[in-house]
Amino acid sequence: MRLKTEYLDMLLLHRPDPLVQPEEVAEAFENLNQNGKVREFGVSNHTPAQMELLLKFLTVPIRSNQIEFHLLHSGMLDGGIAGSPNPVDPSGLEGTIEFCRIHQIQIQAWSPISKGFLSGRSYQGKDGKLKERILKCKAKIDEFSKKHQAPAEAIVVSWILHHPARILPVLGSKNPDRIRKCARSLEVKLSREEWFELYCLGRGSNLP
């Protein structure tokens, strides 16, 4: 195998398939598992209904759901707040966090540092509303960076780690310094008030 290993610890369905045949997915998962090729399975960008459909046929559990989730893309949080649709991130993933907590499915957050827009990457060319959210978030993140004596990356990742669902950030950076800065998120303990300040700035509106 190109991965130079005889098995995978976890295999994820990369995205939902509009033509999915859950029986075929279940059969493939079971064969890979029984033959020792894959130990555990997960999905990516799946809604509660899509996961529930798979679970009706699977004999092995879904262990993770990998979703884009960060300060600028937090729409799946709003499903648990009545009368508070996210005005800028209609992700269609409402109820995902609650479903995953009930079924003990690990949520993995891809792009946890907002594609770098909140920690130095240029956001020129982005639309006006997104620029406004980025600027407001960056100002608050800079404030919290000084308060907690931690880099911006640590504040951004700490916001994800603060959630009781124990969301796991998936870092894709090849920059060792950025990874070290993100690792310092374990040193940051945001207060409830600080968490909500960032949440509202990231979503672009206050909660009711």
Image (cartoon, rainbow, N blue to C red):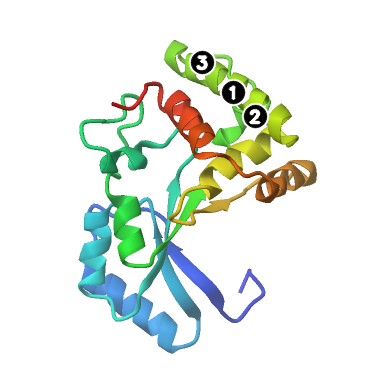
Mark 1, Cα crowd under 10 Å, few <14 / some 14-19 / many 20+, is some
Three-letter amino acid code of the residue under disc 3? Lys
Can residue 21 be seen from the camera position used here? no
The CA distance from mark 3 to mark 2 is: 20 Å
Task: Return the disc, 3 or 2, that comes first in the chain's sequence.
Answer: 3
Query: Where is mark 1, residue-wise?
Result: 140
Residue situated in front as seen by the camera: 75 or 43: 75
Query: Where is mark 2, residue-wise?
Result: 144
Is the residue under label 3 in contact with that under label 1 (CB below 8 Å)?
Answer: no
Query: Where is mark 3, residue-wise?
Result: 131
Three-letter amino acid code of the residue under disc 2? Phe
Is the residue under label 2 in contact with that under label 3 (CB below 8 Å)?
Answer: no
Which residue corresponds to the image point at 67% horizontal and 74% vertical from the top-left? 4
Rendered image: mark on residue 167:
none
Residue situated in front as seen by the camera: 197 or 181: 197
The CA distance from mark 2 to mark 1 is: 6 Å
Which residue corresponds to the image point at 59% horizontal and 27% vertical from the top-left? 117
Mark 3, Cα crowd under 10 Å, few <14 / some 14-19 / many 20+, is some
Q: Quadrant of residue 77?
A: top left
Can residue 90 be seen from the camera position used here? yes
Is the residue under label 1 in contact with that under label 2 (CB below 8 Å)?
Answer: yes
